[in-house]
Image: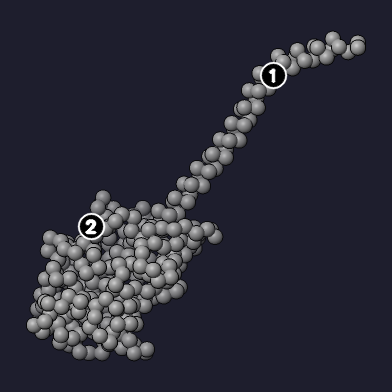
Amino acid sequence: MKNIPYVKKFKKNLLLKFPALLVCFLLVTTLFSSCDGDNATLGEEFNSSIIIDAQEIAEIDDTSENINEIIENAYLEIATSDFFKSSEYKNQQDKRFLSDCVVISKTLLDDYIEIILDYGEGCTTKKQHYAKGKIIIHVDPSLEQANVSMTYTFDDFYINDKKIEGSVEKVRSRTNDDGNPQSQINRNIKIIWEDGTYSTIEGQRTREWVDGNDNEIWGDNEYRITGNWIITKRDGTVSTSKIIEALTRTLACRFIISGIVEINTAEQISQLDYGNGECDDLATITKNGNNYEIHIRRTKGK
């Protein structure tokens, strides 16, 4: 029992040192917890950045496609059928391609026809987009040709509160190799957001009318879209996009309903998947092997 004083002394020293040991333990635990928290925060910020970037690219392209759709529908309404010149024109909205609120004027000039779509101070399109201002179309005078060339410019034109500047060139073919009407579109437009920042989109797109072209019913039209383009976002970041699985757009839905776009930035390649045919504003961005669901439009009606 000679060791009893030593044991007592050891216990006493341990008790004296315990508060310091406890403090060290708590500091180490807090440090590791803080590191884990910082890593989680960084991960959340990284994921949020991916989603925001993808949403902006999707919204830019959605805006551009809405313009393409108005342009295509204007051509169909004015040029393709004697029905639209008849007395029934104003009374059959299911057979019209443009909403009743737009004022259409047509002037024959020296070597082209000028067509103006005037949305005035604002009205709602058939796809429930809010448009105002004018789209000015210059088109070959012979609309009966197999291929018709057109150019489009914008006069104080807005769609869903975004101002559109620039121009679009289009060659519309009555039939392609598969027997379907088709448009080759080259666009160079600026999209100006409400806060004054802007994005640009430049490139080509092929829009093939694959279903509904054998009748005059507006809602059953379906388009197959391919192409590639360059987007400069509001922060100056540049990306290139290429459709690797044809996009599908129907006039019965406000959004692209299927297809995949490959997006290439200076950092890496990602894919934007528009789904399997459901009419909604959802898409999936795949980046670094991870999938993120996004909304094509971040704000309702925008």
**Farthest residue, direction right:** 1
Residue named by callout 1? 18
Q: Position of residue 188 (x, y in %)?
A: 29, 68
Q: Which residue type carries mark 1? A: Phe
241 vs 142, left or right, is: right
Which sits in the foreground, 12 or 237? 12
Q: Residue at x 27, y 60 (%)?
A: 191
- In which quarter of the view is residue 35 placed? top right
- Residue 63, disc: none
227 vs 41, left or right, is: left
Residue named by callout 2? 161
Q: Residue at x 23, y 71 (%)?
A: 70
Q: Marks 2/1: CA distance?
A: 66 Å
Give the vertical position of 223 relative to 269 (above or below): below
Which sits in the foreground, 198 or 255? 255
236 vs 174, left or right, is: right
- In which quarter of the view is residue 164 placed? bottom left
